[in-house]
Image (spheres, grey):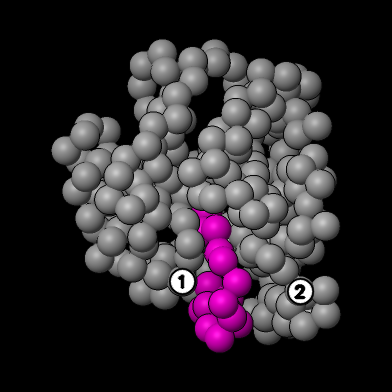
């Protein structure tokens, strides 16, 4: 059975974060371990509080997972602050396991999930450490200074990621406009689009976490990056389509 280590925050509503990661891994038949970076209090309306775990405990969780069961792929999600981000970077310094980095900066309700010091660690250390980075459009703008909403801007943003050490970037198009959602993978100097009709629904909580983890599962199972992204894209669209309709705000997906 393929093995995945997820380094991310906990979502008490179960729709995103560690909880969504575990459900996604289970649906793909991948064994997932976790290193919890923060405990959030949230529901489908908003994030009420973020409570970071001490950096030493985060590092100890990573070491415990890798030194015993091990991992074929590591997925990084919410890191909360610079101290935790640096601890994660230190813990993975001598590790050669592929990393999927989901650059979680803001919640869907607008709550800040990474401070400026953490953003600096992403740009200086973690992007270059990762096999693929999966920013949404606002996150791409925060990391590169460019909102990639046109072909020209997309190419410029990709070049900035390359300067930061990122060789593969999946620009997630959920925050874009129009009737079609376009996730665009930049890999090997080529742009590959994955498209789907935009679904008119409020039940999209945890789509970014779910997509990145689904990609990580594909990589853990031996798929190449393009194939892993293609399967993950289809999985997320189906998870949105069949969402259970829970909550009065942005509801969770159907990970099953």
Residues under numbered marks 2 and 1 in contact, where contact means CB atoms less than 8 Å apart: no
Magenta region? 84-105
As drawn, the residue found furthest toward the left would be: 152
Whether residue 87 is situated above or below residue 172 in the rendered picture: below
- Image coords of residue 20 (percent x, y): 73, 44
Q: Residue at x 78, y 21 (%)?
A: 244
The first of marks 2 and 1 along the sequence is: 2
Q: Which sits in the foreground, 91 or 194?
A: 194
Label 1: few (<14), some (14–19) or many (≥20) C-alpha neighbours in 10 Å: many
Which residue is identified by label 1? 129
Can you say which quadrant of the picture contains the C terminus?
top right
Whether residue 101 is situated above or below residue 129 in the rendered picture: above
Say whether residue 76 is magenta: no
Label 2: few (<14), some (14–19) or many (≥20) C-alpha neighbours in 10 Å: some
- Is residue 121 shown to the viewer in this render? no
Mark seen at residue 70:
2
- Is residue 181 shown to the viewer in this render? yes
Whether residue 38 is situated above or below residue 43 in the rendered picture: below
Say whether residue 86 is magenta: yes
Q: Residue at x 72, y 22 (%)?
A: 243
Q: For the residues marked 2 and 1, what is the alpha-carbon distance in whole angstroms?
A: 18 Å
Judged from the image, the secondary structure of the residue bearing numbered disc 2 is: loop
- Image coords of residue 33 (percent x, y): 79, 63
Side of 104 relative to 14 (left or right): left
- Image coords of residue 17 (percent x, y): 68, 50
* Quadrant position of residue 6: bottom right
Q: Give the tally of numbered discs.
A: 2
């Amino acid at each position: 059975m393929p093995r995945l280590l997820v380094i991310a925050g906990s979502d008490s509503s179960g729709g995103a974060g560690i909880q969504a990661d575990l459900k996604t891994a289970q649906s793909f038949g991948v064994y997932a371990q976790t290193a919890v970076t923060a405990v959030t209090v949230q529901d489908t309306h908003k994030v009420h509080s973020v409570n970071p775990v001490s950096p030493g405990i985060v590092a100890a969780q990573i070491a415990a997972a890798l030194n015993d069961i091990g991992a074929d792929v590591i997925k990084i999600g919410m890191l909360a602050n610079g101290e935790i981000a640096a601890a994660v970077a230190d813990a993975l310094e001598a590790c050669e396991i592929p990393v999927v980095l989901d650059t979680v900066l803001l919640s869907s309700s607008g709550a800040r999930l990474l401070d400026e010091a953490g953003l600096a660690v992403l740009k200086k250390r973690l992007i270059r450490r990762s096999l693929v980075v999966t920013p949404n459009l606002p996150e791409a703008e925060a990391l590169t200074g460019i909102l990639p909403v046109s072909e020209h801007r997309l190419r410029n943003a990709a070049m900035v990621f390359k300067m930061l050490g990122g060789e593969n970037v999946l620009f997630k198009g959920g925050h874009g406009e129009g009737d079609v959602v376009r996730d665009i993978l930049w890999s090997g100097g080529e742009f590959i689009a994955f498209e789907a009709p935009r679904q008119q629904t409020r039940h999209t909580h945890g789509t970014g976490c779910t997509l990145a983890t689904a990609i990580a599962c594909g990589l853990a199972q031996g798929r190449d990056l393009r194939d892993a992204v293609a399967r993950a894209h289809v999985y997320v669209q189906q998870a949105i389509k069949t969402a259970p309709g829970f909550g009065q705000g942005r509801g969770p997906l159907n990970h099953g």
